Amino acid sequence: MNMMKTLGLVLLVAGVLALAYGGFTYTKSSSDVKIGPLELSVKDRETVNVPLWAGIVAAVVGGVLLVAGGRRS
């Protein structure tokens, strides 16, 4: 599989996942405090929303790269 097909497949999958889920969340550890035997940590959940147009563009560009990569010999 050449580089264009691989990049096209990655973009297509990323675009479809962005359209299906609309974003992703991750946990960020913001601070740790240790006072003697006590340990406190705060974890924040951050949400990143992926715009609809970005998912569409990624899926279309990925499809175009897959087709263009398949036509080259």
Image (cartoon, rainbow, N blue to C red):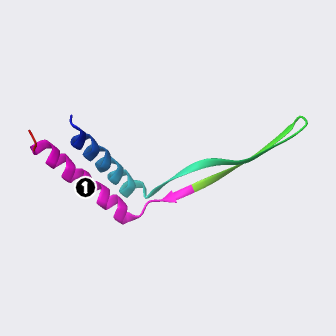
Number of disc labels: 1
For mark 1, what is the residue?
61
Q: Magenta segment, which residues?
A: 47-71
Circle 1 SS class: helix
Q: Main secondary structure of the magenta part?
A: helix
x 28%, y 55%: residue: 59
Residue 73: give x, y in percent of width and height: 8, 38
Give the image location of residue 65, x and y in percent.
21, 49
Q: Residue at x 36, y 61 (%)?
A: 54
- For image coordinates 31% across by 56% down, the residue present is 58
Relative side of 70 to 8, left or right:
left
The quadrant of the picture occupied by the N terminus is top left
Residue 48: in magenta span: yes
Name which residue lies at 61% across and 48% down.
27
- Image coordinates of residue 17 in percent, x first then y, are 37, 51
Q: Is residue 50 magenta?
A: yes
Q: Is residue 42 left or right of residue 47?
A: right
* Residue 42 vertical placement versus 34 (above, below): below
Residue type beneath disc 1: Val
